[in-house]
Image: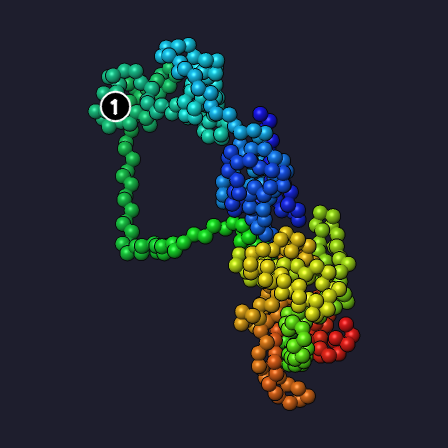
Amino acid sequence: MTAREFTLPDLGEGLTDAEIVRWMVKVGDPVEIDQPVVEVETAKAVMEVPVPFAGVVTGLNAAEGDTVAVGSVLLVVGDQAAPEPASGPVPAAGAAPGPEAARYIEEERAGSGNVLVGYGTARTRERRRRRRGRPVPVAPPTDRPRTMSPVVRKLARDNGVDLTRLTGTGPDGLITRADVEKAIQRPAPPPVPEPAPAPRTTARPAPEMLPELERIPLRGARKAAAEAFARSRREIPEATTWVDVDATALLELRREINASGRHAPVSLLALFARFVTAGLARHPELNSRVDTEAGEIVRFDGVNLAIAVQAGQGLVAPVVREAHRLSARGLQAEITRLTDAARAGSLTVPDLTAGTFTLNNYGGFGVDGSAPIINHPQAAMLGVGRIIDRPWVVDGELTVRKVGQLSLAFDHRVCDGAPAAAFLRFVADCVENPHDAFADL
């Protein structure tokens, strides 16, 4: 029977492993070419993986919940069902061992490394200890005094002489009667006074840890997000700048756009997305990434805009591809599609990869501002806080306006503070003067 091994294929975008979510076949099942056989979860999405050849499943090489590396064997497919084990007579007691058993016995007698762990000759165990870096036990040195005469030992014992403290003057350091008598005549050292007892203190018991409520496995999308956040903080020297903006006019413009009811409503996030793509066209430093291996800054021709979304499996950032070519309504349609897919858990790998800049609307959680973590390997992220009534000065008069905060986190390797501030100021000006902004976009 021909056995073919199906390995986890390269899933693209630098993905190196995946978690087995669900096997869709079992041993003995027939499979056809391109039939999905396993559901896996990567750092980007949950997907079904098809087998590239037909046959019968003869082995599954991972369990559900295991994480397997790209190139590892997932399952084995044969061209026919696995044969039943052949039946035959049981060897009689005392019969000569077969060739395999004979070889095992011979290796065990010779101290081969093939014997069970913990068994074998002393030399074999010593070699195993050395290979594993463990200390090889040696016989402890003796501390018995060098004296052969019972008379000398009795003399020393009757007079309180410690033979282990004497240096013998006999052959090879042998302790003689004269050595013991000399020690008896030597005055004893004065007694060492005992130290005064330390003042008694009441020891405080060490605080006990609270009982654990639960342990949550860090795997799948959550594990990938944790690794991405840690890598971003570790590799990117980021800086953050922010500005408060008067969004009163933007809210009024949005009401006017949606008043007709002829189109799907346009959200504030879509309007911000339009301002961001226009700002990146003017400040391409922020629409880039750092290629550390080549020692180069890579700038992109166009914007793939990632939108941060809180979904059931955690924080994800689906990508609006070529966002710079879309109007506010076009952006709204794509944001709605991707957000719905994220919450339904149906995002694909292309939906989650190749972003060049991220827009994060955390104002929906009722917070004013944040210092967001850059979505590695991108170079910048714009965060939008909640927009609420606040006191604001207009034409020298104090009034109440709709005010929010914009935060820009950027990689200081791709630009200095001035270009970053210019981009942030451009977006802020668009928010405060949206009619003029859309006339120029």
| Residue occupying the point 24% across, 28% down | 160
Q: Residues within 10 Å of mark 1 (few under 14, many from 20)?
A: some
Name above or below for residue 75 compared with residue 235. Answer: above
Residue bearing mark 1? 156
Q: How was this image coloured? A: rainbow
At horizontal 65% and vertical 71% (from top left) the residue drawn is: 264
User: Is 310 rendered above or below residue 66?
Assistant: below
Asked where in the image residue 393 lies, by quadrant, the reply is bottom right
Residue 436, image quadrant: bottom right
Foreground residue among 70 and 414: 70
Find residue 317 and report its horizontal and vertical position in percent. 61, 59
Q: What residue appears at the point 47 percent right and 20 percent down from the top-left corner?
A: 86
User: Most extreme residue toward the left, as rendered?
Assistant: 158
Whole-percent x, y for residue 199 in the image: 28, 54
Residue 230 in sight: no
Give SS at disc 1.
Answer: helix
Residue at point 66%, 53% (across, down): 350
Quarter of the image with the N terminus is: top right
- Amino acid type of the residue tagged 1 in the rendering: Ala
